[in-house]
Amino acid sequence: MTAVSAIASTSLTLTIAAIGVSRFAIGVRRHLRIELFDGTVFYRALIAAVQSGASEALTLDAVLGQDVQSADIRQINWMIPARLAADAIEIAHWTDADGLAIVAAEFAGVAAEEPV
């Protein structure tokens, strides 16, 4: 997805280049991950989408809380349902004094629609 206009800090609307979200994704995918070039990440749910010419207006469930220029957005991705790839994970405790632990876990995407 490519943002085509800025997002105001109080706006619920993300305008993207038309890719058929309003026709094909509503009811199938709902959650977005918006990553900026500075490393900031926003997680939002999609409430509605309306196509108007070459763009689509996506209504988000919450404001971003800061002004975001379209050039500041590194990527916008759909989030998909996932599960652990194994029945167990291993936690290695290196020290109790500092509470340092390392966990290795693998996840697998689930080819299914998001639950309502």
Image (cartoon, rainbow, N blue to C red):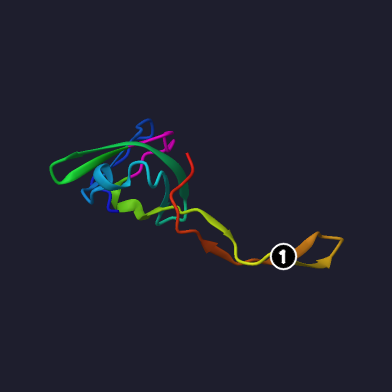
Q: Quadrant of residue 83?
A: bottom right
Q: Is residue 53 left or right of residue 112?
A: left
Residue furthest toward the top? 10
Asked if residue 51 is positioned above or below residue 38 in the image, the reply reads above
Task: Label the magenta part by its dominant secondary structure.
Answer: loop
Residue furthest toward the right? 97
Residue located 41% across and 38% down the image: 66
Where residue 81 appears, as percent x and y from the top left, is 50, 53
Residue 35 lies within the magenta run: no
Q: Secondary structure at mark 1?
A: loop
Residue located 23% across and 51% down the image: 19
Q: Is residue 84 left or right of residue 79?
A: right
Residue located 32% across and 47% down the image: 25
Q: Which residue is mark 1?
A: 88
Magenta residues? Answer: 59-68
Where residue 12 appears, as percent x and y from the top left, is 36, 33
Residue located 49% across and 58% down the image: 110
Q: How many marks?
A: 1
Asked if residue 102 is positioned above or below residue 56 in the image, the reply reads below
**Amino acid at circle 1:** Ala
| 107 or 33, nearer to the observer | 107
Where residue 6 appears, as percent x and y from the top left, is 28, 42
Asked if residue 33 is positioned above or below residue 107 in the image, the reply reads above
Where residue 58 appears, as percent x and y from the top left, is 30, 39
Q: Is residue 31 left or right of residue 51?
A: right
Q: Is residue 92 left or right of residue 87?
A: right
Q: Residues within 10 Å of mark 1 (few under 14, many from 20)?
A: few
Residue furthest toward the front? 112
Q: Quadrant of residue 84?
A: bottom right
